[in-house]
Each structure stands twice: as C-alpha cells, then as structure tokens.
C-alpha cells in the first residue's frame, strides 16, 4: 500500500500537512495496512450493494480505492438517492494546493463529478484525526441500505487512484507499475524539481518511459474508454493513469511557478504535460476547486468604520450561522445580506432585531444534506443560531445580546447597551451624527473615495423647472422642495450634485409674448445693455411687470382674438430661432423678469438652483438626431417626422417634427446626452409630476438603446409626484378657480404662524421676543409647508391644509421644532440653574464625561439615534425624503418619552442626560437640514 505523506505540499513551498497519512501524529505503517484491508472490503461491499440497487451507472460503482481508504459508519433510513463523491477540507489556497488540484484534475479527466462537503460527510471524517488535508468522501446518499459506510481517500495520489477506480472499476490498472510511478512522483520527482542536478535524471526517466509506452503514458498501457474520454485531441480514446496525472500536474505546477524551468524539457515531455495538465485543464481544475472550497467566513464587522446598525446586526447573525454550518450563507446565493439579514422587530417587547433566516435556510440545508446533527425543524436551527449568538464573547459580538427564539424560527435579540452608548458618545464627540458609508447609485453601493475622479461622483438633479413668463404656482411646490431635499441628501453623502433648473424658456409661445411685450412696453425694443440700462432713445429696458400670470393671460387672449397679432407672433418665433437681435433682447428681458419672480420663492424656501433651460440645448439637438440616424435607429413617419421607437412602448419619441421643429422629446434627449457626456454624470434624477413618467421611461430607454447608458455604471431616476389637492379632492386652486401663486401660499403659512406665536406670547407661553417673532414664524411656517409634503410618499396625492400642517401635535414640522426647542431649553437651564455647561463639556479634552444609559427610556432614545445611518441609506435607495421624516418623528417621540420618564435637571445622572439631550438635538438638526427646514433654538 502507498499513502501520500505530508510532502504532498512540498511543491507549493508549504511544510507538511498536504496528505493525510504521513507526517507527525499520523498512523503507523501497520495501522495503515489494516485500514487499507478494511477499506478494500468496504469498497467491494459498497460497489456490490450499489450495483444491486441499480443506483450508479455500470462504469461508476460506489466504491473507493483499496489502498488509501478508511471507513466510518453512519445510519440512515431516508429515501434512496444516488451516491455522491465529495471533496472535503478544501483549503483557502486551493489554486496552488497540489493535493486539491490532483483530485479536481482527475475529476475533469475521468468525468467523475465532485460535490462540496456537507455537514454529514464532514462529520464522518472527524473520527480520522490524521486526515488533515483534502479528502475524498464517498457519500452513497441516504437510505440505500439501513446501515452504510462512508469511505475516505486522502492525500493527492490516494484520491487520484480512488477516482481512477471509480471511473473504470473493471480496468484494474492500479498495478505495481502505477504504484511505482506514483512513488516516483512523490519521493523522487518532487524533491528533484527543487534541485537542478537531480531534475535532469528525473526528466530522463520520464522521457524513456514515454518512449517505451508510446508517448502518451509512463505506464505501459492506459486504460481505454472507461475513463474520461480522449486526452490530447487525436488518436484512440485514452484516459491517463493516476500516475500520469500526478506526474504531469507536478511538472505543470513547477512550470507555472517558474516558466524557465521547462526550457530543459524535451518535446516529448512538454507534449505529455500539455496533453494532460495544460493551462486550459488547470483552469478547469482550479474552477472546480473554487466551487468546492467553502466560502470565506464573513469579515468581522467594524462598527468604527460603518455606522449601520442593520449591517452590524446582520453580521452577527451571519457569523453565528457560519459557525454552525460553514458555507451555509452562500448555499442559497445572494450573499450574507440576503441569507442572514437582520430586521427591526415590529414588537419591541420581543427584541430590537430579528433574523428570519432559519426557515429558508433549513430547506436549503435539508436539500443539500447539510443539516447539523439533531436539527429536525427550523426551530431547532433557530435555537442553534440563538445559542451561537449568545455564546460569542463581547469582543466577537459587541452588538447583540439576549437571543431568544420566537414563532416558527425567528431569532430575536437586543442591542447591547454598551454598543448604544458608544454610538451616542460618538455624536457628542463629533458634534454630528455619523454619516453612512454607502451610497446606492451610479452602479455602485460604495461611498466616493478621495481617489475617485470628480466625474465618478457627479449627480445631476433636475427639479423645480418653472416656465418663463409664468408665475410659480402650487404646481411647482412639490418639485421644488423635493428636489432641494434630494440634493441636500446626496451632497451629505459626498456626491458632486449639479442642481439644474430646466426652465421652460424656449418654444412657440415666445413669439406671442415678445409681440405683446413690444406693444405694451415699447421702450424695451430699443437699445439697452446686458445690465438692463437703456442706451437708446426710449429709456430703460426693464418693464415693470408685477403679475406674470396676468401678463401671460393677456398675451394669450390677444393671440386668440387678433389674426394680425397671431401672424406677427408666428413670424417672431422664426426670427427668434434664427437669432434676430431684437427678438433675443426681448426674450432675455422676459427671462430676467421671470427670474426675479422665481427668486422670491427660492429665497423663502432656501432653494439653491442653477438655471439651464430648454434654450441651452437647442443647438445640441441636430447632433443627437444625426447620431441616431448613423446608428440606424431613426424611423421617418408620415409627414417626415423623425422618431425613435423603444422597447415596451407603442408610441415613439419624436426627435424632430414634420415641420422641422423640435419639442420636449428633442430637448430631453439632448439634455440627457449633455449630462452624461459633458458633465460625466453617473446618476441623473428628474423630479416632475407623475404624468411625465411614461415620457421619461422612453427617454431613459432611448439613451440605453443607443449606448449612452450602461447597466451597472449609470443610474437614472424619475421621481413622479402626485397632485396637491384642495378640500374638494381636486387640484388646489383659489376660490375664483385660479391657480394659487406659490408666494401667496407660503406667506399665508407665515402669517398664520405669526398669529399663533403672538397669541402664545400674550399667554406667557413664548420664549422669544417680539423682534424674533417674524423670523421664527418664517422658519416654522415655511418648514411646516415643506414637511407636510415631504413626510409622505411623493407618488401620492395629498390635501393641502394649513390647519393640519401648523398643528402643534402629531407628525408635523411644528411638533418637531417644538420638541427640538424643548431639548435645547433643558440644556440651557442646566447651565443657568445648575452650572452644567454642555458646550464646555463637549469642547473639553480627554476627560469628557460619557453618556451612560441606565433607564429604559434612555436606552430607547439611544437606540433610535443609532437608526440614523440606516434611515439615510434607505433614503438613498429611492430618494424619497419621507424616510428621514419617519426617522426624526420617531426620534422626537422617543425623546419626549425620555424627558417625561427621566428627571434630567438636578438628578445624579444630570451630566449624562444633558449630553443625551444635546446628542438628540444635534441629530434632529441634521435631519432638518437634509429636509431644508430651518431649526429654531427657542420658541
């Protein structure tokens, strides 16, 4: 008998352990002979039993080789299934481990499938402590017989011989010659390749044997068609012997490590190696080894680098599952996030986070035969997970504690108070909540790095977009405030955000507006510099238009009623598009007047935006049409219109009208091309009303069709918002039926808030002076309008109500601003009445006091503060700001419970609790800023 020894890894530069039988602590030769004889009997028994059951094909009986096998016994009564051959103990360095590669190359050459280890087969080898490296396990399946054996072959050459016998059991080629060549490979060839003087002699012996045997094998004859098919690509069907595979692989690995080593090989040796273990077959073997190797355990979660509580809890559950069944997380695909993801408990009485993986994981483990011993149900598996979580040290698991099992297999846990304390103390230390580490966009879920080029982080947000010569009305409210919040959120996580105001400043309506302005304000048609100062005969070029809506209506009325006016207006359109100086000047005046009106809204709402209107893209449209034509994607419809059809849409995009003009489709295709190509944006966000959803689907599809957009690189979003309604459920309008001017709507909110604050001051319930009332009312009134919109899913409609949005109770900005002011008031009293200066404590050196959580309401508040990073990440998925609204509202409730249930001022825990108040206020202010709401310190 010949058993591979620890020298199996000598060629990889590692010491010992590659085989199973030799090296320190292994069995003696006498013991090995006994094991071999027993294995011979078991192999024959297994082959005979399997044949009677007609389970394996005739040329692949369920037997392991005679010379290098041992056995263990298991018992099962389950339904019969075909035997399997599993490779266990595959090392992490499988790509360079000769022992593993020998088994895998033999599997490729002989056509014997290998499966990864299961819990049952791995457990069967536990009784063989001398098997330290990869081992081949014969797993006959369940229930072939009530009492069956599991045979294990170990060592690279031992597994080679076993697989050769499995592939061709009737060709008893494992004779003395094969044994001799295997011993030559182990004892002479491997050592010789490390000594140049010995290499020539070993190669000479191989070359002589190849000459005698006919060039394809060192053994006098191969074993015909019983193996894995033809090797070498020509001649009779031939499969190499186990000795050939061992020798060729050893030489191939030597050549891979040192390509110059093959320079002394003869043509015959080189051809021999290439035919059996060429690079393509080595790649196949390595690929198989990769599929058999257990996945690496999840890396330890580093909370100092990632503030996500959700991922922290998920990492603990994943580590617990992997400790029970290594490789279980990858068994069903999807990674640890999918297989062991944590969820927040809906019922906080049972825990903070739960893992629901036991049910699905039980099914997968059962199907693969990998269930741990004694696990008969998902509850059993869940209990093992809970025990594993509870058995971790605090260093191994600083996140979760108190594991329990509920229902059909839910594992429930609490977050450790020490972990929560670290989180809130970080807020105090940094003066800000910890930013999330992930950005979901642009084909990546990683945050921008300092090494990234600027374009890697560019996001274009297209929002607000009013029309020139029209007043901003309630219809612009949602796009404006949602867009501002989206920009702030993206900027917060490090994106280079381009805030684009795609104003409607081009089109046929401008012929009408130019003519009306000329007639009503004739001065503007003469002279004038770019700064608006007139230098002609008729004075200033800036008209005093106080009501753009009325101006537009009058122009439209004139257009409809006067044929002459209509004709001149149409000629003005042609002149404008041709670049007529007078028309362009009047057009610019209209734009300037409109901007002054827009700015009134933007100042009130703290909106920052860069205008880049439709006119900017006008000269870029022809190149876009040309590109589509060159790609053969233009369809010329009746009348000559140039269209592009996209998948899943019966209606095309019209890039050019039949009269040669351009429309929204043309402009938006030129805009998306510019943003992707010139601005190098990876993420585009469009915020318009929901009726434009189909249009943008087509624009995105056309951009993808022509190749401007690449999956996994770019991200395109359209946030389609619902309608602002009146109490009647229809679009919000004035009593006269006119559209509500946005300035008037905002000012009314401030006016009502001022009245409320003065009423509180009269009753002695206000903490601000008369001089502060208006500024405070602006912050609260504008904030109330914003929050009332942002706190809901943008796709939904809502009824506009001053009473509800200005309510001091419930989920309103007013309630939140009062909650924030209350916290800061407590901090202020701490300094004034007790001499505890929180600002000084936060600015102090290393001796800063820490927040200690001693009461359940303190712990609950700290837990909610820990949710911040996850709420931001959730927002980044769909860019809906309501996730942040939900977070800050829940946080304010937790804060209210804390200050109600815990005495802060004058308590022994006063310093800690004042710091907790400040940490909460800091986090609330960050949320207000992301929502575009001004905070107030006193009300």
Image (cartoon, rainbow, N blue to C red):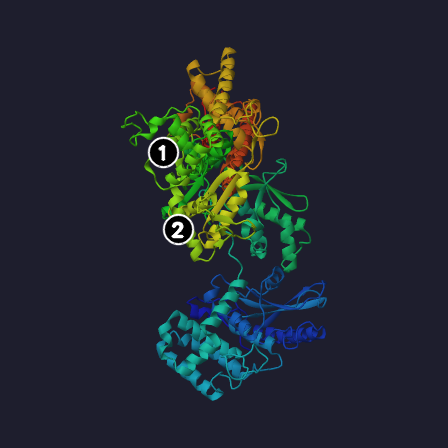
Disc 1 crowd, CA 10 A, few/some/many (<14, 14-19, 20+):
some
Name the one closer to the observer, 367 or 126. 367
The picture places residue 540, in percent across and down from the top left corner, at 31, 25
Classify 94 as above or below 344.
below
Disc 2 crowd, CA 10 A, few/some/many (<14, 14-19, 20+):
few
The picture places residue 725, in percent across and down from the top left corner, at 57, 29
The picture places residue 131, in percent across and down from the top left corner, at 55, 66
Secondary structure of residue under mark 2: helix
Q: Residue at x 51, y 79 (%)?
A: 231
Quickly name the residue at label 2: 623
CA gap between label 1 and label 2 equals: 26 Å
Which quadrant, please, contains the N terminus?
Answer: bottom right
As drawn, the label of residue 398 is none
Classify 728 as above or below 655.
above
Secondary structure of residue under mark 1: helix
Quickly name the residue at label 1: 588
The quadrant in which residue 860 appears is top right
Name the one closer to the observer, 194 or 24. 194
Name the one closer to the observer, 687 or 920. 687
- Residue 918 is at least partly visible in this image: no
């Amino acid at each position: 008998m010949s058993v591979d020894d620890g020298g199996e890894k000598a060629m990889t530069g590692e010491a010992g352990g590659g085989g199973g039988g030799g090296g320190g602590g292994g069995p003696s030769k006498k013991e090995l002979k006994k094991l071999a004889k027993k294995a011979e009997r078991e192999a024959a028994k297994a082959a005979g039993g399997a044949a009677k059951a007609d389970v394996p094909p005739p040329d692949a009986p369920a037997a392991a080789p005679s010379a290098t096998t041992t056995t263990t016994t298991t018992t099962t009564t389950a339904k019969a299934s075909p035997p399997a051959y599993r490779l266990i103990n595959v090392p992490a360095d499988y790509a360079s481990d000769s022992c593993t590669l020998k088994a895998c190359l033999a599997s490729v050459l002989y056509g014997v499938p290998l499966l990864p280890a299961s819990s049952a087969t791995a457990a069967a080898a536990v009784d063989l402590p001398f098997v330290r490296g990869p081992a081949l396990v014969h797993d006959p399946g369940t229930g072939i017989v009530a009492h069956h054996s599991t045979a294990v072959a170990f060592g690279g050459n031992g597994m080679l011989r076993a697989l050769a016998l499995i592939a061709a059991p009737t060709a008893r080629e494992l004779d003395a010659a094969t044994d001799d060549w295997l011993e030559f490979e182990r004892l002479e060839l491997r050592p010789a390749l490390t000594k140049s003087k010995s290499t020539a002699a070993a190669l000479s012996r191989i070359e002589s044997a190849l000459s005698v045997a006919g060039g394809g094998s060192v053994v006098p004859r191969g074993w015909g068609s019983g193996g894995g098919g033809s090797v070498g690509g020509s001649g009779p069907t031939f499969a190499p012997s186990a000795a050939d595979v061992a020798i060729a692989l050893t030489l191939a690995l030597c050549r891979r490590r040192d390509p110059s080593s093959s320079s002394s090989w003869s043509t015959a040796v080189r051809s021999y190696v290439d035919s059996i273990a060429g690079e393509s077959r080595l790649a196949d073997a390595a690929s198989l080894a990769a599929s058999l190797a257990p996945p690496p355990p999840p890396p330890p979660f580093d909370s100092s680098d990632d503030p996500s509580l959700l991922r922290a809890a998920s990492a603990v559950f994943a580590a617990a599952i992997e400790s029970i069944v290594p490789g279980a997380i990858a068994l069903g695909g999807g990674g640890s996030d999918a297989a062991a993801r944590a969820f927040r408990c809906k019922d906080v009485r049972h825990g903070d986070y739960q893992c629901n993986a036991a049910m699905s994981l039980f099914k997968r483990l059962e199907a693969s035969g990998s269930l741990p011993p004694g696990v008969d149900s998902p509850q059993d598996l869940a209990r093992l997970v809970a025990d594993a979580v509870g058995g971790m040290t605090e260093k191994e698991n600083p996140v979760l504690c108190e594991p329990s099992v509920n229902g059909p297999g839910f594992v429930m846990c609490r977050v450790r108070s020490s972990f929560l304390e670290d989180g809130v103390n970080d807020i105090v230390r940094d003066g800000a909540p910890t930013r999330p580490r992930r950005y979901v966009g642009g084909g990546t879920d990683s945050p921008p790095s300092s090494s990234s080029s600027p374009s890697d982080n560019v996001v274009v947000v297209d929002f607000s977009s009013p029309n020139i010569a029209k007043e901003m009305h309630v219809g612009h409210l949602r796009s404006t405030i949602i867009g501002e919040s989206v920009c702030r959120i993206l900027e917060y996580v490090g994106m280079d955000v381009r805030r684009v105001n795609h104003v409607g400043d081009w089109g046929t309506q401008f012929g009408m507006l130019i003519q009306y302005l000329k007639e009503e304000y004739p001065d503007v048609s003469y002279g004038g510099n770019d700064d608006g100062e007139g230098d002609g005969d008729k004075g200033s070029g800036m008209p005093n238009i106080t009501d753009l809506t009325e101006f537009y209506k009058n122009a439209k009325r004139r257009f409809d009623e006067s044929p002459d006016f209509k004709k001149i207006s149409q000629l003005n359109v042609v002149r404008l598009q041709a670049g007529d100086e007078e028309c362009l000047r009047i057009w610019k005046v209209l734009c300037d007047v409109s901007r002054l009106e827009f700015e009134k809204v933007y100042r009130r709402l703290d909106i920052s935006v860069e205008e880049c209107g439709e006119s900017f893209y006008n000269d870029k449209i022809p190149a876009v049409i040309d590109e589509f034509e060159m790609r053969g994607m233009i369809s010329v419809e009746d009348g000559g219109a140039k269209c592009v059809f996209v998948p899943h849409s019966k209606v095309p995009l019209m890039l050019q009208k039949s009269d040669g003009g351009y429309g929204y489709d043309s402009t938006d295709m030129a805009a998306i091309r510019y943003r992707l190509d010139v601005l190098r944006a990876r993420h585009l966000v469009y915020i318009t009303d929901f009726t434009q959803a189909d249009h943008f689907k087509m624009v995105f599809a056309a951009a993808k069709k022509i190749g401007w957009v690449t999956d996994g690189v770019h991200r395109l979003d359209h946030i389609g918002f619902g309608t602002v309604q009146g109490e009647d459920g229809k679009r919000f309008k004035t009593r006269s039926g006119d559209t509500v001017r946005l300035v008037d709507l905002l000012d009314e909110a401030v006016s009502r808030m001022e009245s409320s604050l003065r009423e509180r001051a009269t009753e002695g319930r206000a903490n601000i002076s008369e001089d502060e009332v208006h500024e405070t009312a602006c912050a609260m009134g504008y904030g109330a309008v914003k929050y009332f919109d942002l706190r809901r899913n943008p796709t939904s409609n809502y009824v506009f109500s001053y009473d509800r949005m200005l309510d001091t109770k419930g989920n309103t900005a007013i309630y939140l601003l009062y909650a924030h002011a209350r916290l800061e008031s407590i901090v202020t009293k701490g300094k004034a009445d007790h001499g505890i200066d929180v600002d000084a404590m936060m600015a102090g050196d290393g001796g800063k006091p820490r927040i200690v959580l001693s009461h359940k309401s303190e712990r609950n508040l700290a837990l909610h503060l820990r949710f911040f990073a996850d709420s931001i990440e959730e927002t980044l998925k769909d860019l809906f700001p309501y996730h942040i609204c939900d977070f800050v509202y829940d946080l304010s409730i937790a804060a209210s419970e804390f200050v109600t249930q815990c005495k802060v001022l004058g308590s022994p825990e006063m310093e800690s609790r004042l710091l907790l108040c400040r940490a909460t206020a800091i986090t609330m202010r960050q949320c207000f800023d992301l929502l575009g709401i001004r905070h107030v310190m006193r009300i």
